[in-house]
Every structure is written in structure tokens, then in C-alpha cells.
Image (cartoon, rainbow, N blue to C red):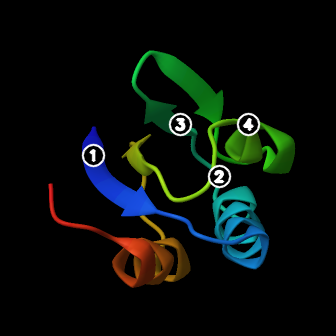
Amino acid sequence: MKQTMIQLKATDEVQEFVKAASACDFDINLQCERAMVDAKSFLGVLSLGLCRRLTVTYVGMDGRFEQILNKYGVAQ
């Protein structure tokens, strides 16, 4: 299991992240404090709020998804 921190600041960033996550054939979760949502759900990701540090947890490997994580990654 892999974990990284990201921060999404606008709805277009959420859309790009969800699109990349949806293309993956493995589970991806986002967590903010105690709330956890499916990263493939646009409304779920938005419900966590913008400009907050989110923990991404995933198991598989996908080059495009890794690029998105690097783009929106923040120091832990």
C-alpha cells in the first residue's frame, strides 16, 4: 500500500485528479482527518473541501496517475 499527500485548490484540479484515478484498475482512497472517500468520485472528492491536505492511499501502479500525484503533491 502506498500513501502520499496532495492538495487540490480548484474544481478543475479535482476533475483532472478524478479522471486520472478513474482510469486506474485499482482502488484509490482519499482521506482528510476522519473522512474517507473513493478518489474516483468527483462529488466525494469535492466533499472533502478544496485547499486541504488529503492523504491518497492506493495499491497499484499507473504512470499517468503517478504524474498527477507528483503535480499536486505536497510535503508530508
Tag 3 near tag 2, CB within 8 Å: no
Within 10 Å of disc 3 (Cα), the crowding (few <14, some 14-19, many 20+) is: some
For the N terminus, which image quadrant? Answer: top left
Q: Find residue 47 and name its label.
A: 4
Which mark lies nearer to you, 2 or 4? Answer: 4
Q: Residue at x 67, y 75 (%)?
A: 13
Q: Which of marks 4 and 1 is nearer the N terminus?
A: 1
Tag 2 near tag 4, CB within 8 Å: no
Which picture quadrant has residue 20? bottom right
Disc 3: which residue: 29
Which mark lies nearer to you, 4 or 1? Answer: 4
Q: Which of marks 1 and 2 is nearer the N terminus?
A: 1
Q: Distance between the residues labelled 4 and 3?
A: 13 Å
Q: Distance between the residues labelled 3 and 1?
A: 10 Å
- Kindly state the secondary structure of the residue where label 4 is placed: helix
Q: In this view, does 42 lie to the left or right of 71?
A: right
